[in-house]
Amino acid sequence: MTTVVEAWARERPDLDLDAIAVAGVDDAMTAPTANVTRLLSALNEKQLGTLDGLLQAPVRALEPQA
């Protein structure tokens, strides 16, 4: 299974992955728990095969659940 960081590295080798990882941890620490849980669920379900998928995951995670 490809990790999120590996997906970023493959899609955007120009990005500072250490800074992104730290920012992601900071966001997760300050976001409402339910939103983080849904985001992690999306990650675990492998919905992030591309950079577009990675960028859309937070949007999907914040959408109201049926």
Image (cartoon, helix red, strand yellow):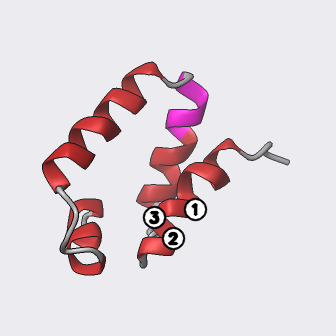
Q: Which residue is mark 1?
A: 56
Q: Which residue is mark 3?
A: 54
| Type of amino acid at the residue the image marks with label 3 | Leu
Please state the extent of the stretch shown in magenta in the rendering. 33-37
Q: Mark 1–mark 3 contact, CB under 8 Å?
A: yes
Q: Residues within 10 Å of mark 3 (few under 14, many from 20)?
A: some
Q: Secondary structure at mark 2?
A: helix
Residue 9, image quadrant = bottom left
Residue visible at 28% across and 72% down in the picture: 7
Q: Secondary structure at mark 3?
A: helix
Measured from the top left, where is residue 51 in percent x and y?
A: 42, 73
Q: From this viewpoint, is residue 1 visible? A: no
Q: Secondary structure at mark 1?
A: helix
Q: Mark 2–mark 3 contact, CB under 8 Å?
A: yes
Q: Compared to 4, does 33 lie above or below? A: above
Q: Which residue is mark 2?
A: 53
Residue 23, image quadrant = top left
Residue visible at 22% across and 63% down in the picture: 15
| Type of amino acid at the residue the image marks with label 1 | Gln
Q: Compared to 16, does 31 lie above or below? A: above
Q: CA distance from mark 1 to mark 3?
A: 6 Å
Q: Mark 2–mark 1 contact, CB under 8 Å?
A: yes
The one of 29 and 44 positioned closer to us in this rendering: 29
The one of 33 and 17 positioned closer to us in this rendering: 17
Q: Residues within 10 Å of mark 1 (few under 14, many from 20)?
A: few
Q: CA distance from mark 2 to mark 3?
A: 4 Å
User: In this image, 5 relative to 57: left or right?
Assistant: left
Whether residue 14 is in magenta: the answer is no
Measured from the top left, where is residue 53 in percent x and y?
A: 51, 70
Measured from the top left, where is residue 2 in percent x and y?
A: 25, 72
